[in-house]
Image (cartoon, helix red, strand yellow):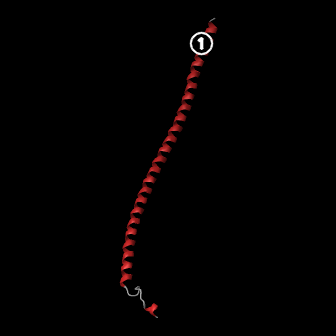
Amino acid sequence: PQTEDHSSRILHQKSKSFLPKMMSADMDAVDAENQVELEEKTRLINQVLELQHTLEDLSARVDAVKEENLKLKSENQVLGQYIENLMSASSVFQTTDTKSKR
């Protein structure tokens, strides 16, 4: 009876020491999975931030191009008006009836 009791105690002790090792392995697997998830989240956050900065830069460039475009349109109108005034003041561009009189 004593040997049975002794062997069952040893078996019980072995199962006790085996269980934490299994749990520890499971915890390590969970930790590794969490680490991978955390790295993925960090990578995605960095990607989002990079895309936000790119979008801000592109928006600023679009605004600058719009502003430049308005300025150029205005300059073209002024130049067009100037050329029109020169042409109307110049005798070279005046319509003459001399050709039709011939």
Residue at figure coordinates x 41%, y 86% from the top left = 95
Which residue position holds label 1? 9
Residue 61 in the image: above or below residue 24: below
Q: Residue at x 52, y 37 (%)?
A: 35
Where is residue 53 shown, x and y percent of the image? 44, 52
Q: Amino acid at mark 1?
A: Arg
Where residue 60 sits, quadrant-wise, is bottom left
Q: What is the secondary structure assignment of the residue under circle 1?
A: helix
Out of 41 and 94, give the one closest to the viewer.
94
State the residue lying farthest toward the top.
1
Q: Splitting the image into 4 quarters, where does residue 83 fall?
A: bottom left
Question: Residue 30 placed where, x, y %?
Answer: 54, 31
- Crowding around mark 1 (Cα neighbors within 10 Å: few <14, some 14 to 19, many 20+) is few
- Residue at coordinates 56% horizontally, 28% vertically from top-left? 26
Horizontal and vertical percent for residue 97?
42, 89
Q: Could you tell whether 81 is left or right of 3 in the image?
A: left
In front of the other: 50 or 30: 50
| Residue extending farthest bottom | 102
- Identity of the residue drawn at 41% across and 65% down: 69
